[in-house]
Image (cartoon, rainbow, N blue to C red):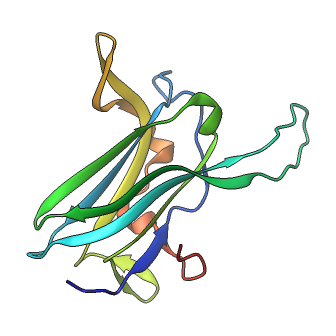
């Protein structure tokens, strides 16, 4: 197993309260795919930006970054996809950022296939009667980050 760890991020992104189906955006789903014949690993976190919001425009305000969900070290078996899911409380999801450090392949400063691949999307979580179950009922296309949308960040390795 390679010990070269690459740091990738979505960068900060806004999460609307509701998606195009008028469903509440209350869950994030992150997929890690391992196309190789070897077990690979990564750490994955969802960060949020919190602070005091002004309700008058124009407005400018500073938000502090905090870890909302820390999935820790995730091992992805060969030729499989591991899905990570977390609920997003309404008061903590306005601005999010997905960060990961793992066995990714980078060429010319961009993530490329050949090792781990990651994607993420926010949407409305599935519910069976009153019990949350895995997956999304409806995804918000504005919050979908394909593997190629992630950027390499050498400044923020932890």
Q: Position of residue 121 (x, y in %)?
A: 41, 46
Residue at image position (11%, 68%) is 78
Q: Position of residue 93 (x, y in %)?
A: 59, 39
Query: Which of the 4 quarters of the picture holds residue 64?
Result: bottom right
Is 73 placed left or right of 80 in the picture? Answer: right
Q: Nearer the viewer, residue 106 or 68?
A: 68
Q: Position of residue 139 (x, y in %)?
A: 39, 35
Residue 75 vertical placement versus 7 (above, below) = above
Is 84 placed left or right of 80 in the picture? Answer: right
Residue 38 vertical placement versus 60 (above, below) = below
Residue at image position (30%, 53%) is 31
Number of numbered discs visible in the structure rendering: 0
Residue at image position (34%, 12%) is 130
Query: Which of the 4 quarters of the picture holds residue 134?
Result: top left
The extreme top residue here reads: 129
Query: Which of the 4 quarters of the picture holds residue 21?
Result: top left
Q: Nearer the viewer, residue 114 or 64?
A: 64
The extreme bottom residue here reads: 108
Residue 63 vertical placement versus 41 (above, below) = above
Residue at image position (45%, 64%) is 149
Give the quadrant of the N terminus: bottom left
Q: Position of residue 138 (x, y in %)?
A: 37, 29
């Amino acid at each position: 197993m390679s010990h070269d760890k690459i740091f990738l991020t979505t960068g900060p992104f806004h999460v609307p309260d509701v998606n195009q189906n008028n469903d509440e955006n209350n869950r994030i789903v992150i997929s890690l795919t391992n196309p190789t014949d070897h077990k690979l690993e990564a750490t994955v976190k969802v960060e949020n930006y919190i602070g005091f919001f002004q309700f008058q425009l124009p407005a400018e305000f500073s938000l502090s970054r905090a870890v909302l969900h820390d999935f820790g070290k995730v091992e992805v078996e060969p030729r499989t996809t591991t899905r990570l899911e977390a609920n997003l409380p309404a008061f903590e999801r306005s601005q999010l950022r997905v960060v990961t450090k793992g066995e990714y392949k980078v060429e010319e400063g961009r993530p490329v296939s050949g090792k781990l691949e990651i994607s993420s999307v926010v949407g409305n979580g599935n519910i069976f009667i009153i019990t949350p179950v895995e997956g999304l009922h409806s995804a918000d296309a504005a919050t979908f980050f394909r593997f190629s949308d992630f950027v390499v960040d050498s400044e923020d390795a932890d």
